[in-house]
Amino acid sequence: GPVLVPILGDQLTRTLASLSGRTKDDTVVLMTEVWDEATYVKHHKQKIALIFSAMRHFAAELRDAGWSVDYVALDDSENAGSFTGEVARAIERHDPRAIHIVEAGEWRVQQAIEEWPDKFDCEVEILSDDRFVCSIAEFRDWAEDRDTLRMEFFYREMRRKTGLLMDGDKPEGGEWNYDSENRKPPKEGLEAPLRPIFEPDDITRDCIDLVEERFGDHFGSLENFGWPVTRDQAEEAADAFFAERIKCFGPYQDAMIHGQDDLFHSMLSTSINLGLLDPLELCQRAEKAYKEDNAPLNSVEGFIRQLIGWREYVRGFYWLHMPHLQRANALNAQRSLPEFFWTGETDMRCLADCIRSTRANAHAHHIQRLMVLGNFCLIAGISPREVQDWYLVIYADAYEWVELPNVAAMILYADGGKLASKPYAASGNYINKMSNYCSDCAYSVSKKTGEGACPFNSLYWHFMERHRDRLESNHRVGRIYSNWDRMGEDKQKAYLGTAEDFLGSLEPADKGWARAD
Ligand code: FAD
Ligand code: DLZ
Ligand code: SF4
């Protein structure tokens, strides 16, 4: 028989390791829409529609190029509901001599795949995913030699490995990192060009209808669906970014403006994670923009660092720490996620705007995820498992390998500081500096305690006080405690009391939003 090549929903590229070198008449590609993947959490509706549509378009593209593709749709009456069940059925149909599959992005799926050699009566070859610059094994080697892992040092290795922005063995311009030039608050009247929106075609409309019908109770709206669903569309989205937004990407990377959902971000994460765009190619395009004087070094370096630094680093970190990363809770945070994370109904204007964008677009940009939503979850002490489920559900670019390290380690410090050197806790002051949220908020950012005070202010000190034992010895945050001690008891009590009142007022979310019972 032929070689069976199962392609998972986030492996949508013709350069996939399991396809390269194969001949078309000796290969059957298997793609399956399965219930288990669509429901292990109750993904945002746009996320499911996006993945199904991109899968269907990719299957058509492969067929046009002459591949035989066996595609099992969700509503196929025989659909077994899981990858393993579908591969078993495909073996009956095709009697393959071997299965070639690229390792899964997620631990849960990889566990299932690793059982295939015992389960199935044919050879199973699991290939490394070469869409990453750093393989899982290579990251392990790098990590093994070190007591503490820091993105910055990993990133320099990746710069050397790829040659991106290198001037011989030195970094272009003399510095590895230009973030100090990249923290500009939004100026009055700042407006970013809009990203291209891709109107749903017939295939996408079918997927949208399917999702409304089968996943109607999932979070989010399908109204604004405009994601790229093919490589051509994703390229067009990338073209627009390089032509119009990369120039300002660096300086305004941490800025937030009410109602301007994308600002100068690339909005390419969904396409990159699906396989529609190659991250290394994007970095090369960014470097070219710099070399041709179309974008400044601080923007280009910042963009490249997100891709070959952060993205690769969190992926390596995920595989190093699974499965226990799912249960990590170094700060012993136990509070339930508040209901307003699903409804958006809160008077805190920053949170309301981020949740509105999340619901409408299945997207929020990085600093909203990190310093508004994430910071709130950290200082309010929300249980990591609930925060993890939330982030995995709500974003169209969310896969556990990238979501979990960002949530458990980056925002919640649940790993006790293995990924980042300090918790990203901040008071309302930070949000006020980097956004225009506070001016129209029901709360007052300059008010520290009592009625009407910005909750971030009191939660910040409540958090610092709760974790004094652990954080005082951290050289990056320890000094803050001298401010606290100088405040005097009355002021401290007012902070703690205001925070307690606020925490007591939070309505816990219904668990049914994230997972079916
Ligand atoms: P840009 O700002 O244009 O950045 C360019 C690219 O860099 C992104 O497309 C992405 O591929 C990569 N990148 C940037 N930051 C990170 C990061 N911290 N980790 C990994 N890659 C990064 N990204 C996801 O792809 N999926 C997730 O599930 C996800 N969950 C997150 C959860 C939290 C709590 C936080 C703080 C960040 C998360 N991120 C996640 C990272 C980042 O927020 C998104 O990649 C980014 O907002 C996507 O929008 P963009 O393409 O416009 O990114
Ligand atoms: C996220 C997702 C969803 C919702 N549905 C499917 C699906 O039906 N079929 C599929 O192949 N992939 C799906 N995916 C993406 C997978 O969860 C993703 O490929 C795994 O995360 C790989 O580890
Ligand atoms: Fe957010 Fe506080 Fe500013 Fe309101 S005042 S927008 S709650 S930071």
Image (cartoon, helix red, strand yellow):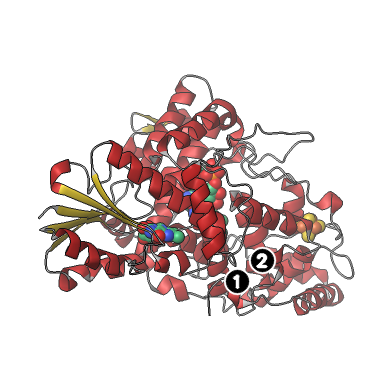
Q: In the rendering, which numbered label is found on residue 513?
A: 1
Residue at the limit of the structure toward the right, as seen here? 451
Ligand 3 found in image quarter = bottom right
Residue 420 appears in the picture as rendered: no
Quarter of the rendering containing residue 35: bottom left
Q: In the rendering, which numbered label is found on residue 342?
A: 2
> Looking at this view, is 93 or 112 the one in front?
93
Quarter of the rendering containing residue 280: top left
* Mark 1: amino acid: Trp
Image location (x, y in percent) of residue 387:
57, 69
Is residue 399 placed above or below 85 in the rendered structure?
above
What's the CA distance linking mark 2 and mark 1?
8 Å
Which of the two discs, 2 and 1, labels the residue nearer the N terminus?
2
126 vs 283, left or right, is: left
Residue in the picture at 26% in, 57% down: 137
Image location (x, y in percent) of residue 105:
36, 58
Is the residue under label 1 in contact with that under label 2 (CB below 8 Å)? yes
Q: Secondary structure at mark 1?
A: helix
> Looking at this view, is 342 or 82 the one in front?
82
